[in-house]
Structure formats: C-alpha cells, structure tokens
Image (cartoon, grey):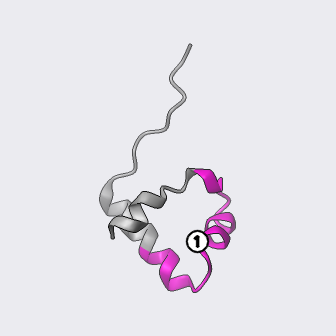
Amino acid sequence: MSNTRKARVPMKEQLRLINECRQSGMTDADWWITRGQVLESWDKSSVKRV
C-alpha cells in the first residue's frame, strides 16, 4: 500500500494563504472552492494559530 498523504505545507506558505484568504473578503469555504481545492484539505487549526 502506498502512502497517499501529501507533504506538509511550510508555515510561511500557510500564512501567505491565510492572509490571501482574509484579504479576499470571501468566506474561507468560498475562497478555497474558487482555488479548486477540496475544502476538507483546509487546515482550520492553522487559522486559529494566527
């Protein structure tokens, strides 16, 4: 069985994405969907840490 887990996103990249989302004026879910990403892949714990 292969490991299907994605590599962890570096903290600087997480912060960049969080700031981009906040500045967009969209909800987290709407912003994430417009990027073509699966909503479940969003790490909500990252947002709480910032």
- Dividing the picture into quadrants, the one containing residue 46 is bottom left
Check disc 1 and report its element: helix, strand or loop. helix
Quick one: which residue is furthest to the top in this view?
1
Q: Nearer the viewer, residue 8 or 49?
A: 49
Check disc 1 and give the amino acid type.
Asp
Q: What x and y, as percent, mark residue 6?
A: 49, 38
Residue occupying the point 67% across, 72% down: 30
Does residue 7 show up magenta in the picture? Answer: no
Q: Which secondary structure class fits the magenta region best?
A: helix
Apparent side of residue 4 relative to residue 29 in the rendered image (left or right): left
Q: Which segment is the magenta one?
A: 19-40
Q: Is residue 50 above or below residue 2?
A: below
Q: Quadrant of residue 29?
A: bottom right
Residue at 40%, 50% in the rendered image: 9
* Residue 23 shown in magenta: yes
Q: Position of residue 7 (x, y in %)?
A: 42, 39
Quarter of the image containing the C terminus?
A: bottom left
